[in-house]
Amino acid sequence: MIAYLTRKDMDLDKYNTCVRSAWNSRIYAFSWYLDIVADNWDLLVLDDYKAVMPLPWRSKYFIKYIYPPCWTQQLGVFGAEIVSEELLREFVKAIPKKFKKVTLQCNAGNPILKKATKKHNYILNLNRSVLEIYEGFNKNRKRTLKKENDALLEKEVSPKEFIEFYEAYVQKPVLSKNHWKALQQLLDRNHTDLHIWGTREKGVLSAVMVWVKDAKRLTYLIPCATTSGKKKGMPSFLVFELIKAFANTDLILDFEGSMISGVASFYRSFGAEKEVYSFYQEKRL
């Protein structure tokens, strides 16, 4: 039986255990993450937390609707067993009628529902040696990594310095107020699974990246670089350092996209493989 629970009524220990043990687990589904990025969120739960579907929602003009929060690429249904199309449909059908519009970005472990749009993500399995992974890079990526530079890797860039850097090189108006607020709160949360790495040249930051670790994935959440840093290949350098740190593990490097050809090409250049997830919308007005 699928039950609907509000945020205050759910058992967080059971919920997070379900997400953590799910074969299709994603960092976005953990309660600490959703509490930051979602305006509100409730839950659909199968039996005694056998499978769960978080429901981020907000209200506009007194109309409630389900939406994908910023900084979350894939939610949907999570469970220890493979999610069938029938079960996914049952979960969607169980979404309370008070939500007049439903927008879901279901994880790649969920079936593609009819009328859903396919979206692309790129992932790299790290269960090989650094050399084996490097051999899968394309010629351009190898050439970039061979460039001489005097950059130093820093693994503890402060949230304050990252925000200042991001404001300077990714103009603030590019982000909505909700995106900006959630980003600041994510960094201020200082969670042990969230990391900020950067490169410094003569003491000055030239590139940074925020990445998040869970039991199954490293999620490449937010990259940013100066124009000079891009030309010198600093984003490639940072990604390669992350790969080197976790090669020969069962982890997957999740690049978080992209449908933009140039960005997708960058991710593929590391030997990353395409992963398909879905975008589903339903109006109930």
Image (cartoon, grey):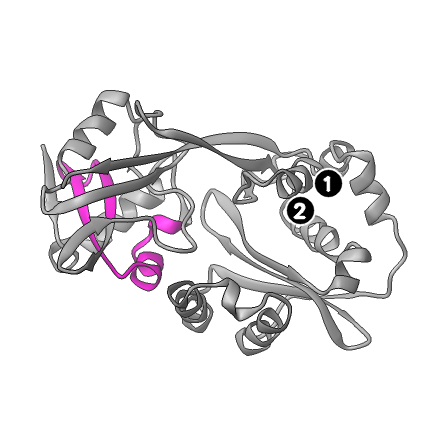
Is 54 within the magenta?
yes
Q: In 3D space, how far apart are the residues under numbered discs 1 and 2 (Cα atoms)?
A: 7 Å
At horizontal 59% and vertical 35% (from top left) the residue drawn is 125
Q: Is residue 163 left or right of residue 77?
A: right
SS at badge 1: helix
At horizontal 10% and vertical 40% (from top left) the residue drawn is 3
Task: Give the extent of the magenta segment.
Answer: 28-55
Task: Name the residue tied to disc 1.
Answer: 130
SS at badge 2: helix
Q: Which is nearer the eye, 152 or 282?
A: 282
> How many numbered discs, if any?
2
Relative to 30, is 249 above or below?
A: above
Q: Is residue 118 left or right of residue 67?
A: right
Which residue is at the far right? 148
Q: Quadrant of the C terminus?
A: top left
Type of the residue with mark 1: Val
Task: Name the residue tied to disc 2.
Answer: 243
Instruction: Find residue 264 and report its image quarter.
Output: top right
Q: Residues within 10 Å of mark 1 (few under 14, many from 20)?
A: some
Determine whether label 1 and label 2 are within 8 Å by CB: yes
Q: Position of residue 246 (x, y in %)?
A: 62, 47
